[in-house]
Image (spheres, grey):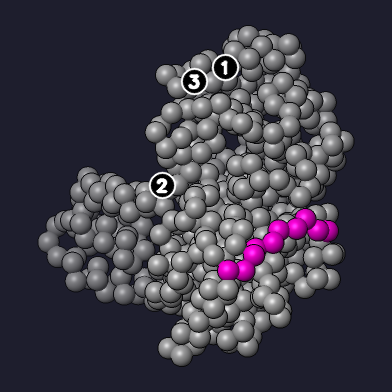
């Protein structure tokens, strides 16, 4: 079975169960400020999981492209990936545990033909906040899953909330045995059991006091990795043997003149990181030292480092990027932005090669005596991108040792600091739909309209991040706004607020919305109906946007708008930080 067949079977199966298909969304989350990238199919659905009515109803299905950066250090094994596609189906307050589990089981065993002898599941074991999920166990038993193939776990089988508050609940995961002879008893610690799906049963809401309450709207969120499922269905115990990886693997073999089987870790890291970089670049994110751009820079440079280990000295990222774009002809965003992708990845590779030259000069300065300190070895890695193996190789040539324990201590301290620095990003729940963020979300619409009016350009939103304290808004523009332009944008927004205009919400077909002049970066998410928010004064329409976020009902609820700062975040993309006072 190939990728296209798997996705088609999945979508068609859930359509037959009265689900409506929603298109693949941007990798830049529209409604969840807690993450840099879309890490799961649920992110575009945040407002609807919290109770807002979805234009297409209560049963939804899609395949979603995702980026997860928490496992970058684990990439190189059989199954961890930075970029992947996720099969997803949702019930927004419609069916719950029994129907969800039965549909998952039917898809896996009847549609995909997975034999029961290779199938196992996990359920939530219970804790002080929620009881043992015997209901899910009973459903699995009724479907013919033997008791010894059901394992109960606690932390691995509880989802959420994403931060301090929000929807959460038990999970039940599904596993496939990749070894030759499946054991009678399921052991979740056995790496031959590979997770292929997870039903999140959003049964509770954690409130601000830390208490877990029964949710008024109980949701189902199923997620299953395309790559993992494809691998096990084709009898592979290695993702990289499938047709969506082999062209990249073959290209690396050609460039390095080495075999994949003898250099799996390096091949996997290079292939994974280049593919992930291609999809991030397709969103018009350029390498930088902040947030998404920093993640992109890290991926490209890590790929270059491991290419050096394989002996690939010449420019190679562009060739691999071209191969990666051809693997996904259904993503038009790759073709549309191919020139940007190839130019930026090549530029970043060249920048890094210059860093390596600087690193060599630094090495010569510290290569005195008999030992390279752990601190210097880690600085070579952190500042110049030198892998420890390269530092050791150069030290050996000079009959020197490297303080490995000291290096590991420095690396551990750095990781702790990085985790602390990024922790603040995950303070809110699944999405912070507080009064403050709702106001700032509405302000984003007004500011976009004001930017178009003042700059007299077809300005488009390129991303946003909203917390209770401030609005951060990215848009296409090639220079810094001057002081006069900043004041004019503020005046346009504050004038609309002072007129106490109504914010009107309608559900329209996408065709109707476009005919009425509605715009929106994320308008391709829905095919039948969309939510349109309109702000009008007595003479004209100020803003008409397709959007799924929370909004105030009248601008009189807002305070005074002020732009605090602006900066560049990439080629042709500006960022404004603004507040209400």
**Residue that label 2 marks:** 427
The local secondary structure at tag 1 comes to loop
Judge whether residue 149 can be spotted in this image.
no
**Residue that label 3 marks:** 130
- Is 536 inside the magenta-drawn segment? no
Residue at image x 57%, y 65%? 555
Q: Which residues are magenta?
A: 500-509
Q: Which circle, 2 or 1, is nearer the viewer? A: 2
Placement of the C terminus among the 4 image quadrants: bottom left
Placement of the N terminus among the 4 image quadrants: top right
In the figure, is residue 485 to the left or right of 343?
Answer: left
- The crowd level at tag 2 (other Cα within 10 Å; few <14, some 14-19, many 20+) is some
Are the residues flagged by discs 2 and 1 in contact, CB closer than 8 Å? no
Residue most extreme to the left: 369
289, above or below 467, in the image: below
The local secondary structure at tag 2 comes to loop
Where on the picture, by quarter, is residue 453? bottom right
Are the residues flagged by discs 3 and 1 in contact, CB closer than 8 Å? yes
Residue 351 place in picture, x, y as percent: 43, 75
**Residue that label 1 marks:** 133
Rounded to the nearest whole Å, what is the CA distance between mark 3 and mark 1? 8 Å
- The crowd level at tag 1 (other Cα within 10 Å; few <14, some 14-19, many 20+) is some
């Amino acid at each position: 079975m190939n990728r296209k067949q798997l996705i088609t079977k999945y979508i068609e199966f859930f359509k037959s169960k009265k689900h409506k298909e929603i298109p693949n969304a941007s990798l830049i989350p529209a409604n969840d400020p807690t993450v840099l990238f879309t890490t799961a199919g649920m992110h575009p659905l945040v407002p609807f999981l919290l109770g807002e009515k979805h234009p297409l109803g209560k049963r939804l299905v899609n395949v979603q492209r995702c980026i997860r950066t928490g496992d970058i250090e684990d990439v190189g094994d059989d199954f961890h990936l930075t970029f992947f596609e996720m099969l997803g189906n949702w019930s927004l307050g419609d069916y719950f545990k029994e129907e969800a589990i039965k549909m998952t089981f039917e898809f896996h065993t009847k549609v995909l033909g997975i034999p029961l002898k290779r199938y196992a599941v996990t359920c939530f074991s219970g804790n002080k906040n929620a009881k043992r999920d015997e209901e899910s166990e009973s459903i699995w038993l009724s479907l013919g899953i033997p008791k010894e193939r059901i394992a109960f776990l606690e932390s691995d089988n509880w989802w959420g909330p994403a931060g301090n508050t929000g929807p959460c609940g038990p999970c039940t995961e599904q596993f496939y045995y990749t070894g030759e002879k499946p054991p009678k008893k399921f052991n979740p610690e056995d790496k031959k059991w590979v997770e292929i799906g997870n039903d999140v049963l959003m049964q509770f809401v954690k409130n601000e006091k830390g208490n877990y309450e029964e949710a008024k709207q109980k949701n189902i969120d199923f997620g299953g990795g395309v790559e993992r499922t494809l691998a096990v269905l084709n009898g592979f115990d290695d993702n990289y043997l499938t047709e969506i990886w082999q062209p990249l693997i073959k290209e690396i073999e050609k460039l390095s003149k080495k075999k994949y089987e003898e250099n799996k870790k390096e091949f996997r890291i290079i292939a994974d990181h280049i593919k992930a970089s291609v999809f991030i670049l397709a969103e018009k994110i350029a390498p930088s030292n902040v947030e998404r751009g920093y993640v992109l820079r890290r991926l490209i440079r890590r790929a270059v480092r491991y290419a050096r280990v394989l002996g690939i000295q010449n420019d190679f990222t562009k060739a691999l990027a071209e191969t990666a774009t051809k693997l996904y002809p259904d993503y038009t965003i790759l073709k549309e932005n191919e020139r940007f992708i190839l130019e930026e990845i090549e530029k970043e590779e060249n920048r890094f090669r210059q860093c390596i030259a600087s690193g060599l000069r630094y090495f010569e300065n510290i290569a005195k005596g008999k030992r390279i300190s752990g601190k210097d070895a880690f600085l070579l890695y952190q500042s110049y991108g030198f892998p420890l193996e390269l530092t050791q190789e150069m030290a050996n040539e000079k009959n020197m040792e490297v303080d490995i324990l000291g290096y590991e201590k420095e690396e551990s301290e750095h990781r702790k600091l990085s985790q602390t620095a990024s922790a603040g990003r995950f303070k809110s729940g699944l999405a912070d739909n507080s009064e403050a963020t709702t106001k700032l979300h509405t302000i984003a619409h007004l500011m976009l309209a004001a930017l178009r009016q003042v700059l007299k350009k077809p300005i488009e939103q390129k991303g946003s991040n909203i917390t209770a304290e401030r609005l951060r808004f990215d848009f296409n523009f090639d220079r810094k706004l001057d002081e006069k332009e900043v004041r004019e944008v503020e005046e346009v927004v504050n004038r609309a607020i002072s007129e106490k205009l109504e914010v009107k919400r309608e559900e329209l077909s996408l065709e109707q919305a476009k005919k009425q002049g509605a715009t929106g970066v994320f308008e391709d998410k829905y095919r039948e109906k969309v939510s349109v928010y309109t702000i009008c004064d007595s003479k004209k329409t100020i803003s008409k946007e397709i959007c799924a976020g929370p909004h105030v009902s009248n601008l009189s609820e807002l305070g005074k708008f002020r732009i605090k700062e602006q900066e560049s975040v990439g080629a042709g993309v500006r960022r404004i930080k603004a507040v209400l006072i």
